[in-house]
């Protein structure tokens, strides 16, 4: 079954810690995305990738970094977590030519204390 | 001013009602118009998309785009409790990135 996975689903961590949010998809999609979503607010694009070794910053400035070494894997890393990073992070993927149809993972809810 | 505006709700309706969800936008370059549904503690899933102006129907759902008024709508007929979710409109411009509305929370009461 084709799907997109995110781990962990929930994470509570102290200020200053390094964290990596994992995202994997089994659909063979070229394009992958990371969005940030606060309750009742819009999804904001923070990173995207057109394929292996391609990464771009999105509209929302973020202190996180991403990598795309394999087609199916698009992890997001925060080197030093801060309370302002508390949010829901959603990973998505799409075919290159049909990016209006994005498939989303269940999200990681991050709380930085 | 936000590029895409959406009433956050919540919108509460009885089962069987017709629901109208709406978004307005300011960027005339938007070409694709989407509606995503997001259940609690889940990621959004695509419901429908339309290209340019017009109507599109899929079962109980109808998407409508009026580019002259920069206004899009999603109608749900015979609403069911399982339709209770947050509905996000999204739009794509020539740069191929999506801009999302803030979502409208819908509650359908049995």
Image: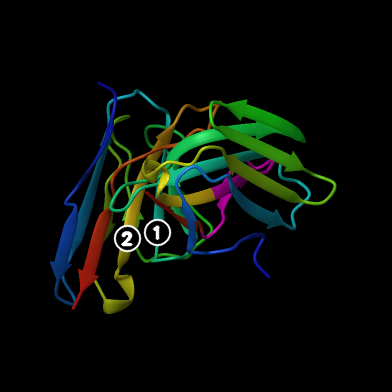
Q: Is residue A83 visible?
A: yes
Q: Secondary structure at mark 2?
A: strand
Q: Nearer the viewer, residue B25 or B47?
A: B47
Q: Nearer the viewer, residue A107 or A45?
A: A107
Which of the pair B67/B11 is nearer the observer? B11
Q: Residues within 10 Å of mark 2 (few under 14, many from 20)?
A: many
Q: Name the N-terminal-most of marks 1 and 2.
A: 1
> Could you tell me if the residues under marks 1 and 2 are in contact, i.e. CB atoms within 8 Å?
yes
Q: Position of residue A103 (x, y in %)?
A: 40, 35
Q: Chain for mark 2? A: A
Tell me the residue that label 2 is attached to: A88
Viewer can see residue B31: no
| Residue A42 shown left or right of residue A4 in the figure | right
Which residues are the magenta region?
B89-102
Q: Specify the label residue A16 is tagged with.
A: none
- Kindly identify which residue carries mark 1: A36
B12 magenta-colored: no
Residue at 31% x, 70% y is: A85
**Element type at mark 1:** strand
Q: Position of residue A7 (x, y in %)?
A: 18, 47
Viewer-proximal residue among A58 and B70: B70
């Amino acid at each position: 079954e084709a799907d997109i996975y995110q781990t962990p689903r929930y994470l509570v961590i102290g200020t200053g810690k390094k964290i990596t949010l994992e995202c994997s998809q089994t659909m063979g999609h070229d394009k992958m995305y990371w969005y940030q979503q606060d309750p009742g607010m819009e999804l904001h694009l923070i990173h995207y990738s057109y394929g292996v070794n391609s990464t771009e910053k999105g509209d929302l400035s973020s202190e996180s970094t991403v990598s795309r070494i394999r087609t199916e894997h698009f992890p997001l890393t925060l080197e030093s977590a801060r309370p302002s990073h508390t949010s829901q992070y959603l990973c998505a993927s799409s075919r290159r030519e049909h990016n209006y149809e994005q498939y989303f993972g269940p999200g990681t809810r991050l709380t930085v204390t | 001013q936000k590029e895409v505006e959406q009433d956050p709700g919540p919108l509460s309706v009885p089962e069987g009602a017709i629901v109208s969800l709406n978004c307005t936008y300011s960027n005339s370059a938007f070409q694709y118009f989407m509606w995503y549904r997001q259940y609690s503690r889940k990621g959004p899933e695509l419901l429908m998309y339309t290209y340019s102006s017009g109507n599109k129907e899929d079962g109980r759902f109808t998407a409508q785009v009026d580019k002259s008024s920069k206004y899009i709508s999603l109608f749900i007929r015979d609403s069911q409790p399982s339709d209770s979710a947050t509905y996000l409109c999204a739009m794509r411009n020539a740069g191929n990135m999506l801009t999302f509305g803030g979502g409208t929370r819908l509650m359908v009461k049995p």
